[in-house]
């Protein structure tokens, strides 16, 4: 999404305190519900020979699209980048304090202010996609080791379609998140202090260079990826539902890791399989609730 279109899609005004709250929630989401199962899974699968359709595709695309200094398969590198992102939340808070006044006004937003909002949205998307990616990875790979197929019960068709449809968005964002705090400070200091004006976007880009206006290349990553800055929504209810979904997804991942260990040892645990089915149902219901809230807010 081009920067002018992105800015026009924002709410007329956004309170800085809501951005700080969003960042604090993202810190919790990464620290408590995303990174712990990732750490356990990548340690199990760090030399894994992926066999699933999605997992093989992701393992080929990831190193081609994500030019990271970290090495390993897509689960390992994702873990390292997300762990660094958790550390960088403090930097993002510092940048928000430097760039934003008490209220952000859409009509007066500068390129650096808009790009920081985009980056915070990107973190939100990455945490959500990464958990679902890990859920589907474990579901596909464990099926190779057992006769009873639970994959279709672990993710709905809509969730699987969402993973495929947003795969390239995730890879673009992984590149954008693969920086140190000091690198982000320099990146944002170097963005020209110019207000975003739809009538001058092309001429400004021609003068200063499009790469200087979007140094993280988030503009090629797709459209709106976090609705709270774009549509009138009951933010508290949305955040609670999102938190509950993240918590249930972590629980599901813990069950899946146990299930994979059982499958590798040629063991079965009916109680664990029931727990998996119950948790998947909870996750699907919460995700449906979130999507419904977003759709109703856009009407």
Image (cartoon, rainbow, N blue to C red):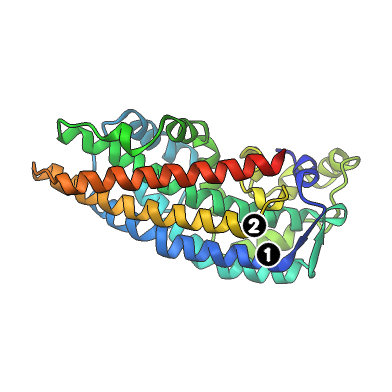
The one of 112 and 183 positioned closer to us in this rendering: 112
Q: Dot 1, how many residues are within 10 Å of its Cα: few (below 14), some (14-19), or many (20+)?
A: some
- Please provide percent x and percent y for residue 230: 72, 48
Q: Residue at x 74, y 39 (%)?
A: 2
Q: Give yes or no for contact between labels 2 and 1 (Cβ–Cβ under 8 Å).
A: yes
In the structure shown, which secondary structural element does the residue marked by tag 1 occupy?
helix
Q: Dot 2, how many residues are within 10 Å of its Cα: few (below 14), some (14-19), or many (20+)?
A: some
In the rendered structure, the answer to whether residue 31 lies left or right of residue 209 reads: left
For marks 2 and 1, give the CA distance: 9 Å
- Please provide percent x and percent y for residue 141: 25, 37
The disc at residue 18 is 1
The one of 238 and 93 positioned closer to us in this rendering: 238
Q: Residue at x 49, y 34 (%)?
A: 162
- Please provide percent x and percent y for residue 202: 85, 38
Q: Which residue is mark 2?
A: 235
In the rendered structure, the answer to whether residue 229 lies left or right of residue 240 reads: right
Q: Is residue 46 visible?
A: no
Q: Is residue 214 visible?
A: yes
Rendered position, 229 above or below 57: below
Q: Residue at x 40, y 42 (%)?
A: 133
Q: Residue at x 29, y 31 (%)?
A: 52
Which badge, 2 or 1, is on the more N-terminal residue? 1
């Amino acid at each position: 999404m081009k920067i002018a279109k992105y800015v026009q899609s924002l709410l007329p005004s956004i309170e800085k305190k809501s951005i700080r709250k969003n960042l604090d929630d993202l810190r919790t989401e990464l620290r408590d519900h995303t990174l712990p199962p990732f750490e356990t899974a990548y340690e199990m699968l760090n030399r894994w020979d992926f066999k699933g359709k999605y997992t093989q595709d992701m393992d080929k695309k990831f190193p081609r699209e994500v030019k990271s200094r970290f090495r390993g398969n897509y689960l390992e590198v994702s873990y390292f980048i997300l762990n660094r992102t958790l550390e960088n939340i403090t930097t993002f808070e510092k940048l928000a304090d430097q760039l934003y006044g008490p209220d952000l006004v859409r009509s007066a937003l500068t390129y650096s202010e808009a790009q920081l909002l985009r980056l915070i949205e990107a973190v939100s998307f990455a945490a959500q996609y990464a958990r679902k990616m890990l859920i589907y990875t474990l579901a596909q790979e464990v099926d190779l080791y057992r006769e009873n197929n639970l994959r279709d019960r672990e993710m709905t068709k809509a969730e699987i379609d969402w993973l495929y449809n947003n795969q390239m968005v995730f890879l673009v964002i992984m590149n954008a998140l693969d920086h140190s705090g000091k690198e982000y400070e320099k990146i944002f200091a170097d963005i020209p202090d110019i207000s975003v004006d739809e009538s001058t976007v092309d001429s400004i880009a021609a003068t200063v260079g499009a790469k200087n206006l979007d140094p993280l290349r988030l503009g090629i990553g797709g459209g709106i990826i976090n609705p709270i800055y774009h549509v009138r929504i009951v933010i508290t209810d949305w955040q609670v539902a999102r938190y509950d979904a993240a918590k249930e997804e972590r629980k599901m991942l813990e069950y899946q890791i146990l299930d994979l260990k059982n499958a590798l040892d040629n063991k079965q645990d009916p109680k664990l399989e029931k727990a998996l089915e119950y948790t998947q149902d909870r996750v699907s219901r919460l995700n449906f609730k979130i999507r419904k809230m977003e759709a109703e807010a856009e009407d």
